[in-house]
Image: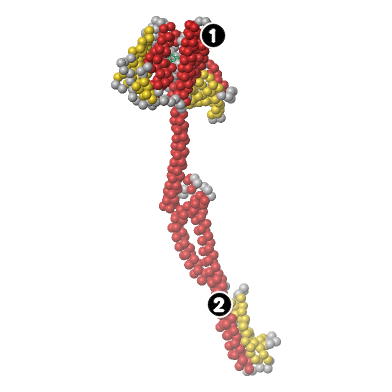
Amino acid sequence: MLVRGESVIASTGLALAAIFTLAIAGAAGWTVYAEREAARRNLERDLGACARILAASAEPHLASATGAVDLRTLLVRAAAEHRLTQCRVVLANGTVIAEGNDAAAGSAESGATVLTASAPVTVPGQGAGEVQVAGALKHSFWVGLEAQTGIGVIGAAAFTAFLITYRRLRARLRAVGAIREALMAAARGEASAAVLSVNEQFGPEAAAWNALLAERERLRQEATTERAREALGNRADVRSDLAHACDALWQGMMLLDEKLTIKYANGAAAVFLRAEREKLAGTAIGDHIADADLLAAIQGVASGQVRRRSTIEVRRSDADAVGVLRFSVRPVRRNDAAAALVMIEDVTQQRVADEARNAFVAQATHELRTPLTNIRLYVEQAIEAGDEDPTVRAKALDVINQESRRLERIVGDMLSVSEIEAGSFKLRAGDVRLENLFDDLKAEYEAQAREKNITLTLRLPPKLPVIKGDRDKIVLALHNLLGNAVKYTPEGGSVEVRVSTDNDRLNVEVADTGIGINPDETELIFEKFYRAKDKRVNQITGTGLGLALAREVVRLHGGDITVQSQPDKGSTFTMTLPMLAEAA
Ligand code: ADP
C-alpha cells in the first residue's frame, strides 16, 4: 500500500516515465522514417542518372549492326554494377530489344519497394524507345537499427539518470507530496491533528510540518482554555456578585428544592434561623423551623401544588429575643423543577409600632374624652346652679377652664408630634423672661396637687436669667415634666421644682416621690407613644407623647432632658438649656 504522499510521487514518476518513453519512441520512429525517405530520394536520383547514362551509351550500339551483343554486355554490366532489378531497352510498342538482367543482381527481395526510371533512346529503323531501369529500395527496419540502437542507448542512459535522480529526490518529494495532501485535507475542512500530520520518516520537511501542526494545536488549545477561563471567570464573577448582593440584603433569603432541602441561604437567613450559615445549605428546612403552618405552606409551594405566594408571621420567644418573623413563601422554577423562595423579615419593630399606635389611639381617645366629659358635666352643673349658687358655679367654671387647657395641651402635643414627624416643627426664637414663668407654671398645678394632697414646692435662684428660645415650646416642655410629676405621684407625696444656673446653663430639676421608673425603661419613655409597663401607669391617662416632645424641644434649643429614677421611690427629671444660645 502507498503511504501518504507516495501516490503523488508514483503518479508523477509514471507520467514522467511514460512521457520519456514516448519521446524516445517518437525520436526513433522519426529517424527511421527520415532515413528511409533519404534512401528513396538517393535511389530515384541514381536510377535516373543510370538510365540517362545507359541511354547515351546504348545509342552507338543500336546504330551498329553488330552492336546487339555489346548492348547486352553493357546492360548486364550496368545491372550487376548498380544492383538493378531491371535494366532493358524497350521500343514504344513494348518490344524488349535488349535485357541486361542477371538473376542474382535482378532478384528483388520480396516485400522490398522497387523504384523505376527511364531515359529515351532512338532505335535506328525501329523508332523511339527507352532505357528502363529498376532498383529495390533496400532500407528496412534493420537498416534503421543502428540509429535506433543509438537513440535507445541514449534513452536508457537518460532513463537511468532520471531513476537515480528520482530515487534521490523521492525522499524529499514524499514529504512535499504528503504535506500537499494534508493541505488539501485541511482545505476540505479536516482539522484533526491525526489526519493532518505526516510520517516523520519522510525527512526534516515532514518533521517541520508536524511541528507547525503541533504549534497550531497548542495555540488552539490555549485559546480554547483562555476562552473557557474567561467564560468561567465571568460566571464566577456574576455568581459572586449575586452572592454578595444577596448577602447585603437585610431580608433573609432561602431557596428550597422540592424535597425541602435548603439549596441557598444568605447571611440574614442564617441569623434569623439562628444557624451557622455554612451549615445551612444541604440541610432540611424542618431542622430549623418548628411552626407547623409555615412548614405546610413551604411544602405546598416547594412541591408545586400551591402556586400562589403566602405570608406567615411566626412569633418567637426564645432565650435571646422576643420578636415576630414574617416568612413570605413564593414558588420559583429551579432547573425545571419546582422550588420555593422563602424571604424572612423581622417585623418585631413594626408590630411594636403598630401596638403602640393602637394603644395611642385608644389612649388619645380616652385622654380627649375625659376632659370633654368633665367639661360637659360641669357645664351642666353650672347651668343647673344658675345664679342661685355662685360658689358651685365658680367651681364649675374653674374645672371647665382647667379641662379646656388640658384639652388644648393634648391637642397641642399631638399637633407638635405630627409636625416633628413631618419635619415642619419650627421654633420662634426670642428672649424668654423666666421671672414669672415658673410661678405661673406652679399656679397651674397647685389645684391638682392640692386635690392629691401633694406638696408642690418651687425653688428659684435670687435672680433668673433671660434665655434665648421659643417661650411657648419651653413652657410646653416644662408643663409636660411637672404634669407627669404630679400625675405619677400618689396621694400625699411631694413634688419639687428646683431652678439653678451654672456658668452658661440653666438647670431645671423636677423631682417627685412618685411611682418611679424601671431602669430598663428610663430611655424608652422618651420614645413616642411609649408608656411604662407598670400597671399603675395604665390606670393613669396619657398618650406617651409628652416626654418625646419635651426632649425634642429642648434638644432643638441645644439642651437635653435626662432622668434619674428608682421604682417606688421617685424620679428626678433634669432639663438643661444653654442660656444665651440662639435657638436652633
Ligand atoms: P404620658 O402621656 O404617658 O405621660 P409621657 O411621654 O409624658 O407620656 O411619659 C412617658 C412615660 O414615662 C409615661 O407613660 C410614664 O410611664 C413615664 N413617666 C413620665 N414621667 C414620670 C414620672 N414623673 N414618674 C414616673 N413615671 C413617669
Please report the residue visible at 61 percent of the width from the left and 79 percent of the height from the top: 115
Residue 255 x/y as whole percent: 50, 26
Which residue is nearer to you in this view: 13 or 248? Answer: 248
Q: Residues within 10 Å of mark 1 (few under 14, many from 20)?
A: few
Give the quarter of the figure containing the C terminus.
top left
The response on whether ligand 1 sits within 8 Å of label 2 is no
Residue 33 x/y as whole percent: 56, 72
Find disc 2 in the rendering and name its residue.
38
Q: How many marks?
A: 2
Please report the residue visible at 44 percent of the width from the left and 25 percent of the height from the top: 425
Residue at the extreme front: 387
Q: In the image, is 250 to the left or to the right of 109?
A: left
Q: Quadrant of ligand 1?
A: top left
The answer to whether any part of residue 356 appears in the image is: no
Occupied quadrant, residue 510: top left
Residue at the extreme right: 93
Q: Earlier in the sequence, mark 1 or mark 2?
A: 2
Q: Is residue 425 above or below residue 69?
A: above
Q: In the image, is 118 to the left or to the right of 351?
A: right
Residue 380 x/y as whole percent: 54, 9
Q: Which mark is residue 383?
A: 1
Residue 147 x/y as whole percent: 51, 71
- Amino acid of disc 2: Ala
Q: Residues within 10 Å of mark 2 (few under 14, many from 20)?
A: few
- Amino acid of disc 1: Ile
Please report the residue visible at 43 percent of the width from the left and 44 percent of the height from the top: 218
Q: Is residue 354 above or below residue 94?
A: above
Element at label 1: helix
Q: Is residue 158 above or below residue 433?
A: below
Please report the residue visible at 48 percent of the width from the left and 18 percent of the height from the top: 411
Which residue is nearer to you in this view: 347 or 583? Answer: 583
The residues bearing labels 1 and 2 have C-alpha atoms spaced at a distance of 174 Å
